Image (cartoon, rainbow, N blue to C red):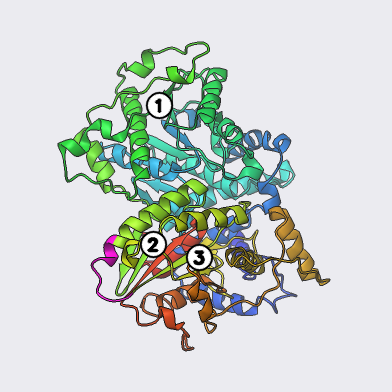
Amino acid sequence: MLRCLFTNLCSDLFCRSSPYGKWIGRRNLTRAGFFYSTQATKMDLMSAADKRYQRAICALNHLQSNLQNLAIKDDLHKNKIQSTLKYVERVGLTLDDIDKLSVIHVSGTKGKGSTCAMSESILRHHGYKTGFFSSPHLVEVRERIQINGQPISRDMFSSYFWEVHDRLTQTASLHNNEMPFYFAFLTIMAFHVFIKENVDVAIMEVGIGGEYDTTNVIRKPIVCGVTSLGLDHISVLGDTIEKIAWQKGGIFKAGVPAVTVPQEPSALHVLLDRSEEIRVCSLYLTPEFKGHRIKSEDPNFKLGLMGRVQEKNAALALQLCNIWLAHRNKEKTYHEMAKPLPHVEIKDIPVLDAYPVDAESKKGLQTCSWRGRNQILTKPEVTYYIDGAHTKESLEQCIHWFQEVASSEARHITGKVVKILLFNMTGDRDISARLTQLKSILSNYTLSSNKSQSCAFDHVVFSPNSLYKDISTPDLTKTSVTQENQLNRCCYMKEIWDERPTKLHHQTSANSQQQLQFIEDLGQLPVVPVELETLDTAPNSQETQNSDNIPSSVITCLSEALQWTTQGRDPALPRRQATLIIPGYLQKASHIQILVTGSIHLVGGVLKLIESVNSPAS
């Protein structure tokens, strides 16, 4: 009875949010009227189980932190682990309970998710029951918590969500009504699920950083991994590769082997120092993937994940799994017999052996899938190339991958092929620097005289991650960023792309002041006073004469951006009543190739709209 009353209250309070993520009470429904009536109609048509799931998502969204909380300083950061431990206890778990989980813990800047996904697939194909916690999700929140390679069902998510949520709310009055933020809640819920489901191995991907990440309440992992490092989340983690390496190495534990891929020397120095400081058994490097001789033994072997960088991630996954399997089988191996050496130099970091790979591990690597990373979806006359790259290095890899696969496809198409880049960038990243880097990367791939052999784009579209202009999708709702905020950022990106000087636009309205404050919080980005280009607005045809300045547009939401970029060819997209106005240089295309990149949240929104099955199986 109490849970029923509570869930109804959640539905009444949280689901009445506007499309901009603000709570709106009964006295102020004007702005949210259309959204609420639409949501209410949808809720009426849902099954009881789906309603329960949607109420859980609404309650979860209420725990989202704002951007200021993301960028908290070191003194507050240090309290995250202690506060998480308090929430763990309030849920009824102990550190001893978490210690009983057999954990593979992975940090890094690039490739964390792919490495974890391959590790999960390898161990599942060895017959073990796997748990996998990752972030962020693409389409539905439950993707973050997986059992045996599948997101937990909506029913399971709802059941475990309310178990954890009810225990926290029941004790809230004794703790100043404190509740964990969104990511911390899901981390605690993942521990709860994995313990209750009695998994053989829990593969835990770090959220941001490592030292102060919520997942770092783990005290006794079996092995720790660090993927490729780069500059990202610099306002939180630091503005140098050394500072970031320090954070990522914070997951190391005494007596636990740690494995990393080859890194920049300065980053390796820091990781080595961290391993000695925390008294890790030893720090190891992975061998090259080709050392495992899989391809020479099986010429038809291909990794399930595309892109050359995946070989580096696969090599790390193989070593993490090999160490875990040795521990599980109580075998003595090189890493367990080795002892830390005082004052080890980089040149002395041991490289693990490239061992013969068994059939189960090969199958795990071949069948592994990880949506939104080097993913290709083909529709009639349209191909989507999807990758959530958002760092300089990952964008370089993304463009290289796109150039290879898109050019290969174009060679088999008779007629005109149009290439469009759909881009957005979120968070605290340096937009100006990243777009400048992107244009430089693209210029290196546009030298081919054969258009089908290059990756020169015909047009660039900047779009917010919102699916629709005035309707929110609960699983993809981000309360810390409004639609107006996202549009301002997209306008700013267009100004940089077009290389036009930007001037701060001063206004005195409260709404504009809020926008200015938001932009200031993101890093002194000015509000751009430009009129948004809509579906019915074509770029100036004269712009196409300058190959160094690819025409660009800002489109107000993803559904309309995809309608425009596909020229209405994808039947999975919501139909638009108005006639699309397509510039002449994009018309009469036999095929359209669309690269979606820059933001994993952008990728999630696109997948939600274009996939024939909009979400993983329940």
Q: Residues within 10 Å of mark 1 (few under 14, many from 20)?
A: many
- Image position of 274 (left or right of 194): right
Instruction: Answer whether residue 44 is visible to the viewer in this image.
Output: no
Q: Is residue 444 above or below residue 361?
A: below
In the visual, does 391 lie left or right of 27?
Answer: left
Residue type at mark 3 is Asp
Which amino acid, by three-letter code, is at mark 1?
A: Leu
Question: Between marks 3 and 1, how big is the CA–CA gap?
Answer: 41 Å
Residue 47 % position (x, y): 44, 69
The magenta stretch is: 408-416
- Label 2 sits on residue: 455
Residue 595 or residue 305, whichever sits in front:
595
Give the foreground label among 3 and 2.
Answer: 3
Report the mark closest to the observer, 3 or 1.
Answer: 3
Instruction: Find disc 3 in the rendering and name its residue.
Output: 548
The one nearer the camera, 265 or 44, is 265
Q: Disc 2 on helix, strand or loop?
A: loop
- Which x, y percent locates residue 514? 76, 64
Relative depth, front residue between 596 and 129: 596
Is 318 above or below relative to 602? above
x, y (%) of residue 425? 56, 58
Q: Are marks 3 and 2 in contact (CB under 8 Å)?
A: no
Q: Quadrant of the N terminus?
A: bottom right
| Disc 1 target residue | 285
